[in-house]
Image (cartoon, coloured by chain):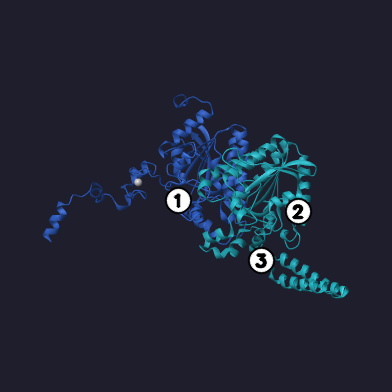
Amino acid sequence: MARMAWFKKERKPRTSERVKLEIPADAWEKCDECGHIDIKERFVRALNVCPNCGHHRRISAQEYIDFLVDEGSWHELDAGLKSVDPLKFESYPERLKLAVKKAGPLEAIRTGYARLHGMPVDLGVMDFNFMGGSMGSVVGEKIARLARRSIDKRIPLIIVSASGGARMQEGVLSLMQMAKTSGVLAEQAFWGIPFVSILTNPTTGGVSASYAMQGDVILAEPGAVIGFAGPRVIKQTIGQDLPAGFQTAEFLLEHGMVDAVVPRSELRDTTAQLLRHMAGRRPAEAAD
Amino acid sequence: MATHTLDFERPLLEIERQIEELKKMGGAGGDGASRSSDLAPLEKQLAELRAEIYRKLTPMQRVQVARHPKRPYPLDYIRLVFTDFVELHGDRLFGDDPAIVGGWARLDGQTVMIIGTQKGRDTKENLRRNFGMAHPEGYRKALRLMQLAEKFHSPVLTLIDIAGAHPGLGAEERGQAGAIARNLIEMAALRTPLIATVTGEGGSGGALAIGMADRVLMLENSVYSVISPEGCAAILWKDATQKERAAEALKLTAQDQLTLGVIDEIIPEPTGGAHADAEAAAEILAEALKRHLRELMKLRTAKLLKRREEKYLSIGAFTEK
Ligand SMILES: [Zn+2]
């Protein structure tokens, strides 16, 4: 026993473990990517980017809204839009209820207007927690209305995507939301109103094959999986493992498919800078 | 023929066999009059049974008909419906995708741009055409041809029969998502009439990539779906053999799309499906295309574009509180 105590005493605890004794267990978080353990507070302050390896964790639509736009400037739009079950698809209503419980009642995208560096913007942010960010009729309608507002008020549009693709439970209606949003965005492009598309992990399927890839400028978060076919389907089709880094934001940058890979901490300023360029405005200082 | 008979078509085989036998006997020197009097009721029975079977197809059987290896493909319709076809190749960027064909042709005395997805008839052709599953260069070729049509004020007609966009390394490397997205936003603004017809499989994004149009038509036994029944079953129930259940749930038939407001018209097929009589199928298709084309050609471009945008804006189902 004494011998054990001696060993214990001699063993030099790592800093984190010592602190652990003083901080409650739920105040700690671990990075899924590198295993780094840190105080939750530090993850939060870094916008849920691992302080050690830079891995971007998935965050909610609300969290994007919080750090992207000027404080107190957010006004939610079309919060009353709700999905129905047009195909009478088995267990869709139950899945919707679960999604609302998990992610809130605002569907797989939240839309609204706000200010960014003082500039008025229309912003849509998808929420992967709501049925995998799947695009159904509500997502299509919210984007269409937001883009319409953007055209009518001559306000730049920003869409943050996070989606596995079209919502199977709404069948071809969900597929057609790709065409629906493209229709309004084509008109928006015609009027020369800037559209910045921000791709987060993951952006695949029908969303990547429509508005997400139609931005005047397309930014992607580091490490985000972006592509049309999902990695699992491709793997199954070709019958071999996918090359390392396949379909990541960096892979798309290398192949010329996105404009830039931008860390979460820089998204706000980079987007503002881009909008100033596209609107022909002067740099930040001059725009208060 | 027998090798391509679908399981639900099997009852027809027996009658067909009897008819064949009677004909053979007749040919071998039988009594001509009694032969035709024997033949007539059998042929009537065959036609009635075929009509009966095709009237009651389940959604998955509809998928089987849409995938029938003898079903006319876009190049067949191009040959049967149009004249003066000149095929154009290549996207001018990377290559030529044989899974998408297109070129100038004439219909109803008018030059049109016709674009279709193309499956192969045999293994060799299927390898060349990648089973009709397009790559980004295919969608980019299609867009190039559409813009060519726009430049010379020709309407664009597309014929769709595609299982889906190709899920592979090269397709992703070359920006499959971006290529489809680009087609959609360009088709939305294309300053010439667009008519899309699903002739076989309307496979998700791969189909929509040449399927956004002023008029969207579907052949009676074609299907349109956001995902294949097999894929849907694998995701929802981790079991691809549940495809009947998935096909039912996905509402993928032409009638479903008409009910949901996704398409404008169903084009009837000859009894027994388009593969039973390609010429007859082509004739009905030609009539429908001409009719829609005449209507669209009357519209001024601004009105055409406005209606196109409104048409798609109206698609979707939701409530608002
Ligand atoms: Zn980490």
Name the side, left or right, on which A108 lies relative to B5.
left
Beta carbon at label 1 within 8 Å of ligand 1:
no
For label 3, the SS is helix
Q: Chain of mark 1?
A: A
Q: Which chain is cyan?
A: B
Could you say which is closer to the camera, residue A196 or residue A287? A196
For label 1, the SS is loop
Q: Identify residue for label 3.
A: B3
What is the three-letter code of the residue carrying label 3?
Thr
Q: Residues within 10 Å of mark 2 (few under 14, many from 20)?
A: many
Q: Measuring 83% from the left and 71% from the top, which residue is drawn there?
A: B40
Rounded to the nearest whole Å, what is the CA distance between mark 2 and mark 1? 43 Å
Query: On the same chain: label 3 and label 1?
Result: no
For the residues labelled 2 and 1, say whether their Cβ atoms are less than 8 Å apart: no
Could you say which is closer to the camera, residue A233 or residue A148? A233
Q: Chain of mark 2?
A: B
Rounded to the nearest whole Å, what is the CA distance between mark 3 and mark 1? 38 Å
Q: Residues within 10 Å of mark 1 (few under 14, many from 20)?
A: some
Report the number of discs: 3
Q: Earlier in the sequence, mark 3 or mark 2?
A: 3
Q: Identify residue for label 2.
A: B282
Query: On the same chain: label 2 and label 1?
Result: no
Q: Which chain is blue?
A: A
Name the side, left or right, on which A6 lies relative to B153.
left
Q: Residue furthest left?
A: A2
Rounded to the nearest whole Å, what is the CA distance between mark 3 and mark 2? 24 Å
Residue A242 has which mark?
A: 1
What is the three-letter code of the residue carrying label 2?
Ala
Can residue B114 be seen by looking at this rendering? yes
